């Protein structure tokens, strides 16, 4: 028995929920698939699939076997791609992790045109604001906002930077007043990003002096786009990245506050970084995506 081929037939059958559909995907006869899976079950001494006239489902043993079989096939595919990826043209699968709002607004609109240039490249994009385990989650490249200093054994390449801006809607400022200096934020409703400790401090720096404000408010979210929507609706004062609110400021939907100050100004906290593992050095896939990021308008357009 060709065990690797049998594993592929099994995984395809589970994914397609039927022998015939799996056979079509593999360009094989249905009888070849059923015979191979019968032989696989016989060699294992376990039933992997519940067979009926209409539907194929996995048994408990089959579900566990499927997970391991999928990992094996993905590893073989990755090994093949690793060799092919050293050629002139990027080929194989590229798994990319992007921050949710940043990925949607600053990268996704341009991906289609870029993908058209590389027909042999299969790209899988995951959107998350969580820290990504590149090895455990089998991610090839992760774009992160803020300091990459906490990452060990990872190459962190700075691809751009952004600025945080304090903003509020004209309606909010008309009803609640315009704070004249950062300390006055203590009496305002501030919209906070959910991370770390419940209490948050916004740091303002100007001409060598620094002011810290322990902001508070009645709304928190772990999504910057949600905070922007609340700010637009007059729900409070937000601290949001320029790539998210610059258009709103230009169109007077939001009013900037304290633009003469740097807010949360640590250099690394405003970095946009691409992270990948050392064994990806020389990867055509990684290099192609880094080049793509460098050509984008906005915060990733970085002067070398």
Image (cartoon, grey):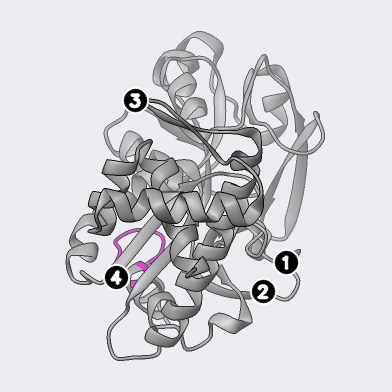
Which of the two labelled residues, at mark 2 and mark 4, occupies the earlier sequence position?
Answer: 2
Label of residue 219 in the image: none
Label of residue 53 in the image: 3
The magenta stretch spans residue 94: no
Which of the two labelled residues, at mark 2 and mark 3, occupies the earlier sequence position?
Answer: 3
Which of the two labelled residues, at mark 4 and mark 3, occupies the earlier sequence position?
Answer: 3
Q: Quadrant of residue 52?
A: top left
Q: Could you tell me which residue is drawn at 40 percent across and 90 percent down?
A: 86
Seen from the viewer's position, the closer of residues 265 and 68 is 68
Alpha carbons under labels 2 and 1: distance apart: 6 Å
- Tell me the mark number nearer the camera, choosing from 2 and 4: 2
Instruction: Say if residue 242 shows up in the picture.
Output: no
Q: Could you tell me which residue is drawn at 55 percent across and 62 percent down?
A: 139
Label 2, residues with CA under 10 Å away: few <14, some 14-19, many ≥20: some
The residue wearing badge 1 is 151
- Tell me the mark number nearer the camera, choosing from 4 and 3: 3
The part of the chain drawn in magenta is: 293-300
- Please, which residue is most extreme toward the top here? 175
Alpha carbons under labels 2 and 3: distance apart: 50 Å
Question: Is the residue 259 above or below the residue 216 in the image?
Answer: below
Alpha carbons under labels 1 and 4: distance apart: 26 Å
- Tell me the mark number nearer the camera, choosing from 3 and 1: 3
Alpha carbons under labels 4 and 3: distance apart: 53 Å
Q: Could you tell me which residue is drawn at 44 percent across and 42 percent down?
A: 14
Which of the two labelled residues, at mark 3 and mark 1, occupies the earlier sequence position?
Answer: 3
The residue wearing badge 2 is 154
The residue wearing badge 4 is 295
Q: Is residue 186 left or right of residue 173?
A: right
Image position, residue 281 (x, y; %): 53, 86
Alpha carbons under labels 2 and 4: distance apart: 23 Å
């Amino acid at each position: 028995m060709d065990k690797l081929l049998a594993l592929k037939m099994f995984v395809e059958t589970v994914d397609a929920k039927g022998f015939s559909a799996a056979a079509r995907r593999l360009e094989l006869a249905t009888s070849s698939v059923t015979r191979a899976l019968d032989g696989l079950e016989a060699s294992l001494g376990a039933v992997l699939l519940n067979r009926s006239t209409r539907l194929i489902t996995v048994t408990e043993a089959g579900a566990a076997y499927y997970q391991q079989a999928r990992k094996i096939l993905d590893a073989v595919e990755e090994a093949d791609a690793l060799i092919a990826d050293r050629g002139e043209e990027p080929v194989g699968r590229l798994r990319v992790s992007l921050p949710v709002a940043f990925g949607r607004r600053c990268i996704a609109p341009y991906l289609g045109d870029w993908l058209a240039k590389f027909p042999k490249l299969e790209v899988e994009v995951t959107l998350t604001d969580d820290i990504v385990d590149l090895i455990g989650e089998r991610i090839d490249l992760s774009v992160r906002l803020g300091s990459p200093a906490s990452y060990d054994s990872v190459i962190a390449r700075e691809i751009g930077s952004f600025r945080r801006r304090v903003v509020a809607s004209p309606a909010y400022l008309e009803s609640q007043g315009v704070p004249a200096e950062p300390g006055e934020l203590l009496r305002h409703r501030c919209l906070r990003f959910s991370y770390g400790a419940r209490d948050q401090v916004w740091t303002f720096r100007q001409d060598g002096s620094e002011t810290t404000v322990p902001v508070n408010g009645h709304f928190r979210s772990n999504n910057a786009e949600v905070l922007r929507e609340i700010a637009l609706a007059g729900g409070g004062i937000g601290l949001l990245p320029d790539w998210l609110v610059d258009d709103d400021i230009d169109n007077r939907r939001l009013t900037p506050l304290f633009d003469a100050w740097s807010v949360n100004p640590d250099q690394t906290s405003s970095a946009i970084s691409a992270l990948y593992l050392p064994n990806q050095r020389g990867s055509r896939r990684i290099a192609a995506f880094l080049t793509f990021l460098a050509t984008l308008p906005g915060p990733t357009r970085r002067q070398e």
